[in-house]
Image: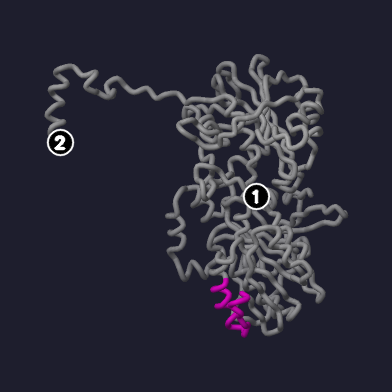
C-alpha cells in the first residue's frame, strides 16, 4: 500500500477534524493539557501515532482519552492497552490507578482489567507476536493502544489489531501507537509516520486494495508541552542531558528521529559513505552479493572495486574500495520487511536483466541457498532459470570474529572506517534500501557483538557477504622510532645498565 506525501495532504483542521470543546468532554478528574495531548484526545482518525520526545505525556494522554471514551460510550467501550511484555505495563497500570480510581472504576488485578461505571472495559495485555493479536478475534474491541511501538522490529503484530477493531454499538474505533526514537522498529516507524510528515499534524493516507482511503496521522510529542511534568520535576530536562551520547540526548529530548543511539554501525556517516552515481571505469572489478528471501525481502547488491585512487565529487575513492552502485531489494511496497515471494527462477531472471552489459567477475550468496532438500537448491534454480548466466558461490557466513579471524561485521565495519579519513566502502545515493536500513540496525541484546537479527537486516547481511569475499586489512599505524619498545634484545649495553636500577625498583 502506498502512502501519500504529507506535504500534499491537508492539515488536521482543514480535513474536517473538529476539536471536542470543554462542554462536550465529560467532567472527569483528568483533563488533557493544551497542545499534543489535547490533539490526541480530539483526534478522530482510525490510526494515530503519538511519538517523539520522552516526557511528552503520551501515556497520560492515552489513559485520559480512554476515560473520556468510557464515559461517553458506556458498555460499548472495550479497549486493549498493550506492550511487548506484561511487566513493561507496570508504570502504565500504576498511573491508571491514579486516574481511574477517582472516577469510580473497578480494578481486577488478576485479569489486569478496569471496569468503568458505565460498563466499559480496559484490559492490559502483552502483544509480542501476531498470534497474540489473533487471541482477540471475534471480540468487539473498540480501541487498542500499543505503547513503545519502536520496540517492535516490524509492524505485523500491531497491524493485526486492525482485524479486531469493530463496534456493534457505534463507537468510533481507533488504534493508538506511542513511541520514542530508537529501537529495533525505528526504520518502519520513521518510514510510515515521520518521513511523510516530519512536523506531524498532517493527514496521511494509504490507498486500500478495494479503492478506499485509510487516513492516519502523526502527532509529535514535545516535552515542553508537558507543563505539569516541568512544573513538578524541573530537573527532568537536565536528567535527559545526562543520559549518554549526543545522539541519545537529541532523540529523547528533541524527539529527533534522525539521531540513532546504539547503532550497530556507529561509524556510518551519510556525508562520507553516500556518493552521487558516476560512470564506473571499465577496468574496475565488478561482483554481486545476495541474501535470499521470499516471505522476507531478498537483497542483491552490485559492487565495483576501485582499481586506483579515483576522484569523484567531494572525495577521492581509494584504491581497493568497494562501491555499491546498484541494488535490488525484494520488498513489498509500503510494507517494510515483507518479501515479494518471487520464485528463484523469477529472481534469477530479474538479476540477469538488471546486470546486462556488466562484466560480473563472481557472485556470493547466503550458504543456506545452496541446500538441496530433495531437489535443486535455490542457487541452482537461479542458474538454470537463466541458462547459467547468473551464478553464485557460497558466501563466507562468519558473522563475528572467531579464533583471531575477522568476522563479517568486523570486515564491514573496518571498510566503513577505512583509514579514519577515507572509507573503503561507498554507496550510490540510488541504493535507497541499504541507506534506509543499515544505519538504523541495533545490537543484539543477548550478543552485543552481533546485530539484532529480528530487524530488517537483509541488505546488511548481503553487504557482509560482499566484504568477506574481499578481505580488507586496515593500514598499520606506524610507531615512531623514538617510541619503539626497548627490550633486552635491542638495547645497547649502556641502555641495559641504565634500565637495571629501574627494574630493581619495581621489584
- Residue under the point 63% across and 58% down: 149
**Dot 2 crowding, Cα within 10 Å, few <14, some 14–19, many 20+:** few
To which quarter of the image does residue 374 belong? Answer: top right
Q: CA distance from mark 2 to mark 1?
A: 61 Å
- On residue 380, the disc is none
Tell me, yes or no, whether the highlighted magenta stretch contains residue 305: no
Coordinates of residue 115 in the picture (x, y in percent): 66, 80
Q: Quadrant of the C terminus?
A: top left
Q: Is residue 490 left or right of residue 151?
A: left
Magenta stretch: give its range.
Answer: 93-112
Q: Nearer the viewer, residue 290 or 104?
A: 290
* Residue at image mark 2: 507
- Circle 2 SS class: loop
Name the image colouring: one colour
In this view, 245 is above or below 220:
above
Where residue 351 appears, x then y in whole percent? Answer: 76, 29
**Element class at badge 1:** helix
In this rendered view, identify the residue nearer to me: 188 or 314: 188
* Residue 462 falls in image quadrant: top right
Q: State the mark number for residue 190.
A: 1
Q: Is residue 102 magenta?
A: yes
Decide: is 107 above or below 79. below
Q: Residues within 10 Å of mark 1 (few under 14, many from 20)?
A: some
User: Where is 92 relative to 457, above or below?
Assistant: below
Amino acid at each position: 500500500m502506498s502512502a501519500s506525501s504529507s506535504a500534499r495532504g491537508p492539515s488536521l483542521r482543514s480535513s474536517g477534524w473538529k476539536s471536542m470543546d470543554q462542554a462536550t468532554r465529560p467532567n472527569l478528574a483528568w483533563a488533557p493539557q493544551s497542545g499534543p495531548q489535547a490533539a490526541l484526545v480530539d483526534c478522530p482518525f482510525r490510526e494515530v501515532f503519538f511519538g517523539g520526545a520522552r516526557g511528552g505525556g503520551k501515556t497520560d494522554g492515552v489513559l485520559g482519552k480512554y476515560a473520556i471514551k468510557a464515559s461517553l460510550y458506556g458498555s460499548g467501550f472495550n479497549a486493549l492497552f498493550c506492550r511487548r511484555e506484561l511487566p513493561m505495563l507496570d508504570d502504565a497500570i500504576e498511573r491508571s490507578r491514579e486516574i481511574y480510581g477517582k472516577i469510580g472504576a473497578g480494578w481486577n488485578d488478576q485479569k489486569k482489567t478496569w471496569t468503568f461505571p458505565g460498563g466499559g472495559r480496559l484490559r492490559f495485555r502483552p502483544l509480542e507476536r501476531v498470534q497474540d493479536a489473533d487471541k482477540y478475534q471475534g471480540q468487539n474491541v473498540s480501541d487498542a493502544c500499543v505503547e513503545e511501538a519502536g520496540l517492535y522490529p516490524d509492524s505485523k503484530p500491531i497491524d493485526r489489531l486492525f482485524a479486531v477493531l469493530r463496534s456493534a454499538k457505534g463507537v468510533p474505533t481507533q488504534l493508538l501507537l506511542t513511541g520514542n526514537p530508537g529501537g529495533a522498529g525505528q526504520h518502519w516507524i520513521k518510514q510510515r509516520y515521520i518521513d511523510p510528515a516530519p512536523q506531524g499534524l498532517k493527514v496521511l493516507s494509504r490507498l486500500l486494495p478495494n479503492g478506499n482511503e485509510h487516513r492516519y496521522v502523526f502527532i509529535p510529542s514535545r516535552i515542553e508541552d508537558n507543563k505539569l511534568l516541568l512544573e513538578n520535576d524541573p530537573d527532568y530536562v537536565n536528567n535527559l542531558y545526562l543520559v549518554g551520547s549526543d545522539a541519545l540526548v537529541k532523540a529523547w529530548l528533541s524527539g529527533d528521529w534522525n539521531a540513532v543511539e546504539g547503532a550497530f554501525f556507529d561509524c556510518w556517516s551519510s556525508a562520507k559513505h553516500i556518493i552521487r552515481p558516476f560512470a564506473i571505469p571499465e577496468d574496475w572489478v565488478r561482483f554481486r552479493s545476495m541474501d535470499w528471501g521470499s516471505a522476507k525481502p531478498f537483497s542483491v547488491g552490485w559492487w565495483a572495486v576501485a582499481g586506483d585512487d579515483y576522484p569523484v565529487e567531494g572525495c577521492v575513492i581509494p584504491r581497493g574500495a568497494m562501491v555499491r552502485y546498484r541494488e535490488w531489494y525484494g520488498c513489498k511496497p509500503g510494507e517494510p520487511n515483507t518479501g515479494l515471494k518471487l520464485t528463484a527462477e523469477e529472481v534469477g531472471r530479474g538479476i540477469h536483466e538488471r546486470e546486462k552489459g556488466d562484466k560480473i567477475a563472481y557472485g556470493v550468496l547466503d550458504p543456506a541457498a545452496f541446500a538441496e532438500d530433495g531437489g535443486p537448491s535455490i542457487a541452482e534454480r537461479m542458474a538454470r532459470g537463466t541458462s547459467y548466466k547468473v551464478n553464485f558461490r557460497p558466501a563466507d557466513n562468519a558473522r563475528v570474529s572467531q579464533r583471531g579471524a575477522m568476522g563479517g561485521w568486523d570486515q564491514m565495519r573496518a571498510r566503513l572506517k577505512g583509514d579514519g579519513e577515507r572509507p573503503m566502502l561507498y554507496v550510490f545515493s540510488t541504493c535507497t534500501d541499504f541507506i534506509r536500513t543499515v544505519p538504523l540496525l541495533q545490537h543484539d541484546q543477548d550478543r552485543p557483538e552481533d546485530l539484532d537479527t529480528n530487524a530488517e537486516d537483509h541488505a546488511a547481511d548481503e553487504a557482509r557477504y560482499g566484504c568477506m569475499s574481499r578481505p580488507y586489512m586496515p593500514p598499520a599505524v606506524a610507531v615512531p622510532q623514538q617510541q619503539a619498545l626497548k627490550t633486552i634484545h635491542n638495547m645497547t649495553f649502556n641502555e641495559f645498565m641504565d634500565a637495571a636500577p629501574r627494574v630493581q625498583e619495581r621489584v
